[in-house]
Image (cartoon, coloured by chain):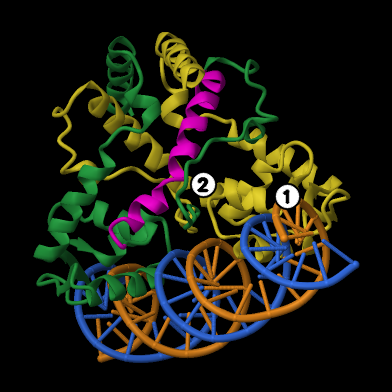
Chain colours: A yellow, B green, C orange, D blue
DNA sequence: ATAAACAATTGACACCCTCAACCATTGACC
DNA sequence: GGTCAATGGTTGAGGGTGTCAATTGTTTAT
């Protein structure tokens, strides 16, 4: 998220210049739609670190909790989902484990593998985090119902055919 | 980023569990639409570090170049746009300046502030970066024209009223 | 003229990330 | 059975990103 950055989370508004060079009107229909979504995307992602910080989590830790939704997950699998090196996950999990949010359990089938499970505290924290994440940002919340329904339907179709 | 995170950029698919606990059908219209957008958002953001790496940039450096679109920008302003501490920007700009992408120019009006400008090389790199960023992800590219047009119009309205 | 506010930097410290090297375990092959 | 390559996780070196507290130089208000 890396990538996202940590920081004070005052009121943020996006600078028009950020899209400069993207040629708003140009390109095909996909480019036009994408450019606009891209704007929402980046302005929202700017808040993610602050949002994670509300739960005393780094952005990446929040991602991990997010991914650890259901049952156990091998470290290597997590590394793949996070698109990062396995060695990175070691320290990541170390810190989460030290905070009592996650547990390493050796796999029965393959003793090389360590499975990750949320502790009770971890599951509780994840619940609160997910609830917070599902709150739509102002830009969405302010949309008229018509647009919201259309948006939802479009996205459902897109995610289904993908 | 880092929040986003840096990492190998193989083929990525999102794990259903990531949305677990978000209660897909529940909530009002805003929540429903948002949950779906949220999915797109996170899967796409996962690729951002790899995308930046194509230009030998860290995710944050790519953000900075993005923001530095038009004229000069004070360091403090950049810090505000990045939602990060001013002290962080110092090192950030140090590295970009060392690579010849950005220049510090003392302001005429106020000798405390240093204005950032893209060098020629920086502007060229930014151009290529922005072109790359404007390429819609597969999920968008695969949408039918009807949906794309609707999506574009909805987003235009939303960004305008915001 | 003095004091408060501000822009940028520095230094200490922590996290995130990669790469290369390493250990233990597994599975295939002779 | 014994050997060897492949795999999962950890460690260590090195660098980017981020914070906070303290410092310097400049501006602005009183």
Badge 1 local density, few (<14 within 10 Å), some, or many (20+)?
A: some
For residue A48, the mark is: 2
Which residue appears at 26% of the width and 70% of the height? B96
Q: Is residue B107 left or right of residue D9?
A: left
User: How far across and how far down the image is residue A15, in percent?
Assistant: 26, 45
Q: Are marks 2 and 1 on the same chain?
A: yes
Main SS class of the magenta portion in the image? helix
Which residue appears at 28% of the width and 43% of the height? B133
Dividing the picture into quadrants, the one containing residue A58 is: bottom right
For marks 2 and 1, give the CA distance: 26 Å
- Look at the image and give the residue range highlighted in magenta: B30-56
Label 1 marks a residue whose chain is A
Dividing the picture into quadrants, the one containing residue B102 is: bottom left
Q: Is residue D21 left or right of residue B102?
A: right
- Element marked by disc 1: strand
Which residue appears at 27% of the width and 23% of the height? B156
Please state which of residues A12 and B65 is positioned toward the viewer in this rendering.
B65
Mark 1 — residue? A74
Badge 2 local density, few (<14 within 10 Å), some, or many (20+)?
A: many
């Amino acid at each position: 998220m890396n990538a996202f950055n940590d920081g004070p989370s005052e009121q943020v508004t996006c600078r028009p210049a950020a899209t400069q060079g993207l040629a708003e009107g140009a390109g095909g229909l996909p480019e036009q739609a994408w450019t606009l979504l891209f704007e929402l995307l980046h302005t929202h992602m700017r808040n993610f670190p602050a949002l994670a910080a509300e739960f005393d989590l780094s952005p990446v830790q929040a991602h991990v909790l997010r991914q650890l939704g259901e049952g156990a997950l091998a470290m290597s699998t997590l590394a793949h989902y996070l698109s990062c090196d396995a060695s990175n996950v070691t320290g990541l999990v170390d810190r989460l484990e030290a905070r009592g949010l996650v547990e390493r359990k050796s796999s029965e089938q393959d003793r090389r593998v360590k499975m990750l499970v949320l502790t009770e505290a971890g599951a509780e924290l994840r619940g609160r985090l997910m609830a917070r994440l599902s709150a739509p940002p102002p830009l969405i919340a302010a949309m008229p119902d018509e647009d919201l329904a259309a948006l939802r339907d479009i996205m459902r179709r897109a995610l289904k055919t993908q």
